[in-house]
Image (cartoon, rainbow, N blue to C red):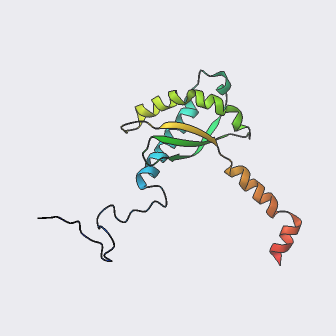
Amino acid sequence: MSRSSPKRPDGKGPAGRLAGLSSSGPSQRQLRVSEEVRRVLAELFARTTFRDPELEGVMITVTEVRISPDLKHATAFVARLGRTDVEAVLPALKRVAPYLRTQLSHTLRLRMAPEIHFQPDTALDYAMEVDALLRRPEVKRDLDE
Protein backbone atom coordinates (compact mmCIF):
# COMPACT_ATOMS: atom_id res chain seq x y z
CA MET A 1 0.00 0.00 0.00
CA SER A 2 1.49 3.32 -1.03
CA ARG A 3 0.98 6.37 1.00
CA SER A 4 0.68 9.71 -0.77
CA SER A 5 0.87 13.12 0.75
CA PRO A 6 -2.28 15.22 0.83
CA LYS A 7 -2.72 17.70 -2.02
CA ARG A 8 -3.53 21.38 -1.81
CA PRO A 9 -7.06 22.38 -2.82
CA ASP A 10 -5.78 23.58 -6.21
CA GLY A 11 -4.09 20.19 -6.79
CA LYS A 12 -0.63 21.72 -7.27
CA GLY A 13 1.54 20.03 -4.69
CA PRO A 14 1.59 18.94 -1.08
CA ALA A 15 -0.59 20.53 1.52
CA GLY A 16 0.50 20.94 5.07
CA ARG A 17 2.26 23.12 7.55
CA LEU A 18 5.28 24.02 5.39
CA ALA A 19 3.58 24.19 2.00
CA GLY A 20 2.47 27.84 2.28
CA LEU A 21 5.75 29.32 3.49
CA SER A 22 7.33 31.90 1.26
CA SER A 23 10.89 33.16 1.28
CA SER A 24 9.89 36.80 0.93
CA GLY A 25 11.05 37.87 4.38
CA PRO A 26 12.35 36.77 7.75
CA SER A 27 10.36 34.29 9.78
CA GLN A 28 8.79 35.15 13.13
CA ARG A 29 11.56 33.20 14.86
CA GLN A 30 14.25 35.17 13.02
CA LEU A 31 12.56 38.43 14.00
CA ARG A 32 12.27 37.39 17.65
CA VAL A 33 15.86 36.19 17.88
CA SER A 34 17.26 39.23 16.07
CA GLU A 35 15.42 41.60 18.39
CA GLU A 36 16.67 39.68 21.43
CA VAL A 37 20.25 39.79 20.09
CA ARG A 38 19.88 43.54 19.50
CA ARG A 39 18.65 44.08 23.04
CA VAL A 40 21.47 42.05 24.61
CA LEU A 41 24.15 43.74 22.47
CA ALA A 42 22.77 47.17 23.37
CA GLU A 43 22.95 46.30 27.07
CA LEU A 44 26.52 45.00 26.69
CA PHE A 45 27.63 48.17 24.90
CA ALA A 46 25.92 50.32 27.54
CA ARG A 47 27.54 48.71 30.59
CA THR A 48 30.67 46.87 29.49
CA THR A 49 34.17 48.27 29.55
CA PHE A 50 36.09 46.57 26.79
CA ARG A 51 39.79 45.83 27.06
CA ASP A 52 40.30 47.20 23.56
CA PRO A 53 41.71 50.75 23.82
CA GLU A 54 39.93 51.83 20.62
CA LEU A 55 36.56 51.20 22.30
CA GLU A 56 37.42 53.07 25.50
CA GLY A 57 34.79 55.76 26.05
CA VAL A 58 33.03 55.06 22.73
CA MET A 59 29.23 55.09 22.85
CA ILE A 60 27.84 52.58 20.35
CA THR A 61 24.18 52.12 19.46
CA VAL A 62 22.87 48.91 17.92
CA THR A 63 20.08 50.06 15.63
CA GLU A 64 19.13 46.75 14.02
CA VAL A 65 20.16 43.11 13.89
CA ARG A 66 19.42 40.81 10.98
CA ILE A 67 19.89 37.10 11.49
CA SER A 68 20.35 34.35 8.91
CA PRO A 69 17.61 31.72 8.49
CA ASP A 70 19.79 29.09 10.20
CA LEU A 71 20.40 31.50 13.15
CA LYS A 72 24.18 31.05 12.84
CA HIS A 73 25.09 34.55 11.61
CA ALA A 74 23.87 37.89 12.90
CA THR A 75 24.59 41.22 11.22
CA ALA A 76 24.45 44.07 13.72
CA PHE A 77 24.01 47.58 12.32
CA VAL A 78 25.79 50.02 14.60
CA ALA A 79 26.17 53.78 14.93
CA ARG A 80 28.13 56.06 17.23
CA LEU A 81 26.15 58.49 19.31
CA GLY A 82 26.65 62.00 18.01
CA ARG A 83 29.34 60.94 15.52
CA THR A 84 29.41 59.74 11.94
CA ASP A 85 32.76 57.92 12.01
CA VAL A 86 31.53 54.47 13.03
CA GLU A 87 33.76 52.89 10.34
CA ALA A 88 36.76 53.77 12.51
CA VAL A 89 35.64 51.41 15.30
CA LEU A 90 34.57 48.50 13.08
CA PRO A 91 37.98 46.75 13.35
CA ALA A 92 37.80 47.01 17.14
CA LEU A 93 34.25 45.63 17.12
CA LYS A 94 35.45 42.72 15.03
CA ARG A 95 38.13 42.01 17.64
CA VAL A 96 35.63 41.96 20.53
CA ALA A 97 33.02 39.93 18.59
CA PRO A 98 34.09 36.59 20.17
CA TYR A 99 33.64 38.09 23.65
CA LEU A 100 30.21 39.44 22.67
CA ARG A 101 29.25 36.06 21.25
CA THR A 102 30.22 34.41 24.53
CA GLN A 103 28.07 36.89 26.43
CA LEU A 104 25.18 36.22 24.04
CA SER A 105 25.50 32.49 24.64
CA HIS A 106 25.16 33.05 28.39
CA THR A 107 22.06 35.20 27.97
CA LEU A 108 20.12 33.69 25.05
CA ARG A 109 18.42 30.35 25.15
CA LEU A 110 19.67 29.02 21.81
CA ARG A 111 21.57 25.88 20.91
CA MET A 112 24.34 27.95 19.40
CA ALA A 113 25.03 31.66 19.70
CA PRO A 114 25.23 33.39 16.31
CA GLU A 115 28.49 34.68 14.91
CA ILE A 116 28.31 38.48 14.98
CA HIS A 117 29.21 40.68 12.03
CA PHE A 118 29.13 44.48 12.28
CA GLN A 119 28.00 46.94 9.61
CA PRO A 120 27.71 50.73 9.87
CA ASP A 121 24.12 51.97 9.97
CA THR A 122 23.74 54.62 7.29
CA ALA A 123 19.95 54.97 7.46
CA LEU A 124 20.07 58.19 9.53
CA ASP A 125 22.64 59.75 7.18
CA TYR A 126 20.46 58.82 4.21
CA ALA A 127 17.34 60.27 5.87
CA MET A 128 19.16 63.54 6.62
CA GLU A 129 20.35 63.71 3.00
CA VAL A 130 16.80 63.21 1.68
CA ASP A 131 15.50 65.83 4.12
CA ALA A 132 18.12 68.32 2.91
CA LEU A 133 17.12 67.64 -0.69
CA LEU A 134 13.44 68.18 0.08
CA ARG A 135 14.22 71.53 1.74
CA ARG A 136 15.97 72.91 -1.36
CA PRO A 137 14.09 75.89 -2.86
CA GLU A 138 13.59 74.32 -6.30
CA VAL A 139 12.19 71.13 -4.79
CA LYS A 140 9.91 73.07 -2.42
CA ARG A 141 8.61 75.04 -5.39
CA ASP A 142 7.79 71.82 -7.28
CA LEU A 143 6.10 70.29 -4.23
CA ASP A 144 3.92 73.37 -3.63
CA GLU A 145 2.57 73.39 -7.19
Q: Is residue 107 above or below residue 23?
A: above
Q: Tell which of 16 and 105 is nearer to you.
A: 16
Residue 77 at x, y = what percent? Answer: 60, 44
Residue most toward the left?
1
Residue at screen point 56% across, 30% down:
47
Residue 129 at x, y = what percent? Answer: 77, 55
Residue at screen point 86% across, 63% down:
136
Residue most toward the front?
1
Task: Judge from the rendering whether residue 87 lies leftward or rightward of residue 102; answer left or right.
Answer: right
Residue 133 at x, y = what percent? Answer: 81, 61
Q: Quadrant location of the C terminus? A: bottom right
Name the quadrant containing residue 7.
Answer: bottom left
Q: Quadrant location of the N terminus? A: bottom left
Residue 71 at x, y = what percent? Answer: 43, 44
Residue at screen point 63% across, 36% down:
60
Residue at screen point 68% across, 39% down:
81
Q: How many marks?
A: 0
Task: Judge from the rendering whether residue 2 lies leftward or rightward of residue 110; answer left or right.
Answer: left
Name the quadrant containing residue 143.
Answer: bottom right
Q: Is residue 22 above or below residue 59?
A: below
Q: Is residue 11 above or below residue 84?
A: below
